[in-house]
């Protein structure tokens, strides 16, 4: 009998064997923080360093410690300073960056927006958008950049589920502004790492300011348009915008908070899924024996289960491939917190003000937690195997009170997108497909994902 092929090991920086100098460290943080982590970060349960340039730092890898920080004693941890400095100017009081009472009220007000019934209602537009998107591959002969394409697809899906196409302004200008915003904003500025005062202008951010103003205006006009429609008693779609506007009120959201949250959904809700879809398609192409299983499953389900709402449950292999890509390339590679008061976990002391990093990147590749951590092995997530994982060793969507509110939306979207694309097309890598994972706002493939698409 033939032995199974050796699993595919996709590209990733090797753990460093010696620590970088301070200058080198700053350079790496700016260029690609994933290249910063050394052997101990992939082997130890935690690392505590007293004197980094950002102050005391704890890297938390142990699932028990992660649970302590994100769940059991979550009230002692706020969002880290650097993260807030980067994101708050853009997202303001959106759910991702709000804290304290504003966050509690908003999270509660938004729970009804993300009920299973509403998410299920988005399955049809997800399917429809992907079908329309997939048309472009019908006559393609030249290589396509799958990474870029997945961003276009998830943006189409998000724009449709947010606004049902009713966006103020000229057609196309919204997408253009989103693009510009992502390019120029949201970077770690070296001045933030040094803890420079806020009045010192950050060059990396100034560039995006005009685009942000313009973008906010489109969102505000779109909201006003919809509100007028609702006030006139016209029928409106059950999209995110309608659901959010219904949450407006004294115990719910303010007008500004609705605007902030729309911008937050755009910031948090399409690039993340796009990145993971791109990495999934790439890994499957490099492991054709895994791709065969996924294709066979999709063909069988599409032949019998017509309602896309049921695809996530009906396709465990497809889901597992996506979950494995989320493990290897978590779109949010680092969850950053700051201790409000001194805290203890077993014999570890976390001093007041310490930065605590829970990094899906290192936790998902930790030697004590996974067999062959660098290998692409979707079987880890097959039904039966998945239950053996500790809840806190797999954190693509975070954990605790601040767990991703869009996780079910993203999983449903991913499986529908993969089902449509892989049922019709085969994606193959080319000699020039050499992606290198780089941490920007998400874990991106540097060099893109140039691939050949052929009809199956
Ligand atoms: C594969 C796709 C996605 C990934 C990997 C992802 C990952 C995450 C993670 C790790 C967090 C927690 C951050 C922290 O604890 O610091 C988070 C929070 C959040 N995500 Fe997602 N996300 C995804 C898709 C989405 C989508 C589709 C939406 C909205 C439509 C969304 C909206 C949010 C929001 C609003 C928060 C903040 C929640 C809070 O703090 O209460 N995400 N996401």
Image: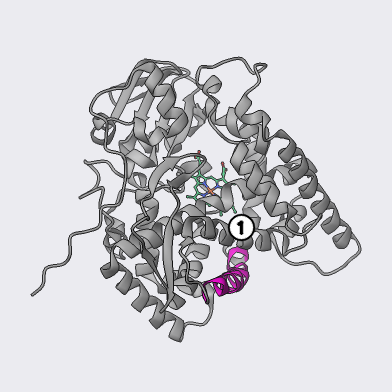
Tell me if residue 90 comes above or below residue 272 in the rendering.
Answer: above
Residue 13 image position (x, y, % from top left) = 31, 39
Task: Answer with the quarter of the image where residue 439 lies.
Answer: top left
Taking the image as shown, residue 114 lies to the left or right of residue 404, namely right
Taking the image as shown, residue 169 lies to the left or right of residue 346, namely right
Residue 354 painted magenta: no
Q: Residues within 10 Å of mark 1 (few under 14, many from 20)?
A: many
Tell me if residue 290 comes above or below residue 103 in the rendering.
Answer: below
Task: Answer with the quarter of the image where residue 388 lies.
Answer: bottom left
Residue 58 image position (x, y, % from top left) = 37, 25
Tell me if residue 114 comes above or below residue 84 in the rendering.
Answer: below
Q: Could you tell me which residue is drawn at 64 percent across and 33 percent down? A: 88
Taking the image as shown, residue 351 lies to the left or right of residue 127, namely left
Q: Nearer the viewer, residue 436 or 270?
A: 436
Dot 1 falls on a residue whose secondary structure is helix
Residue 340 image position (x, y, % from top left) = 50, 22
Task: Answer with the quarter of the image where residue 61 lies.
Answer: top left
Which residue is tagged 1?
Answer: 155
């Amino acid at each position: 009998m033939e032995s199974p092929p050796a699993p595919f090991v996709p590209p990733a920086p090797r753990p460093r064997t010696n620590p970088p100098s301070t200058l080198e460290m700053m350079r790496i943080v700016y260029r690609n923080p994933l290249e910063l982590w050394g052997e101990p970060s992939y082997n130890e349960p935690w690392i505590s360093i007293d004197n980094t340039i950002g102050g005391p730092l704890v890297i938390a890898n142990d699932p028990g410690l992660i649970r302590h920080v994100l769940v059991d004693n979550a009230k002692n941890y706020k969002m880290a300073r650097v993260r807030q400095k980067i994101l708050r100017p853009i997202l303001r009081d959106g759910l991702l960056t709000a804290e304290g009472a504003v966050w509690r009220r908003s999270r509660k007000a938004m729970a009804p927006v993300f009920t299973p019934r509403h998410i299920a209602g988005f399955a049809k537009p997800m399917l429809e958008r992907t079908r329309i998107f997939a048309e472009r591959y019908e006559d393609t002969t030249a290589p396509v950049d799958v990474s870029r394409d997945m961003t276009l697809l998830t943006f189409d899906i998000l724009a449709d589920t947010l606004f049902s196409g009713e966006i103020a302004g000229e057609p196309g200008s919204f997408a253009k502004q989103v693009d510009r915003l992502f390019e120029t904003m949201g970077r770690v500025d070296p001045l933030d790492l040094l803890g420079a005062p806020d009045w010192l202008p950050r060059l990396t951010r100034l560039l995006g300011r005009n685009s942000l103003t313009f973008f906010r205006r489109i969102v505000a006009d779109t909201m006003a348009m919809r509100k007028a429609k609702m006030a006139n008693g016209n029928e409106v779609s059950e999209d995110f915008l309608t659901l959010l506007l219904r949450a407006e009120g004294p115990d719910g959201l303010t007008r500004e908070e609705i605007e902030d949250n729309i911008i937050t959904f755009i910031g948090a809700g399409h690039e993340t899924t796009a990145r993971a879809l791109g990495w999934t398609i790439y890994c499957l192409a490099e492991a054709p024996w895994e791709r065969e299983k996924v294709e066979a499953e999709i063909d069988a389900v599409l032949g019998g289960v017509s309602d896309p709402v049921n695809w996530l449950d009906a396709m465990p292999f497809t889901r597992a491939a996506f979950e494995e890509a989320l493990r290897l390339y978590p779109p949010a590679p680092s969850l950053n917190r700051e201790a409000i008061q001194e805290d203890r976990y077993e014999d570890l002391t976390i001093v007041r003000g310490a930065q605590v990093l829970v990094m899906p990147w290192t936790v998902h590749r930790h030697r004590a937690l996974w067999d062959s951590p660098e290998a692409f092995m979707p079987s880890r997530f097959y039904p039966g195997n998945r239950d053996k994982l500790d809840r806190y060793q797999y954190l693509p969507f975070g954990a605790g009170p601040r767990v991703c509110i869009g996780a079910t939306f993203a999983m449903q979207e991913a499986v529908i997108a993969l089902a449509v694309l892989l049922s019709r097309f085969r994606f193959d890598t080319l000699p020039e497909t050499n992606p290198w994972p780089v941490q920007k706002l998400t874990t991106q493939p540097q060099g893109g994902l140039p691939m050949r698409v052929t009809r199956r």
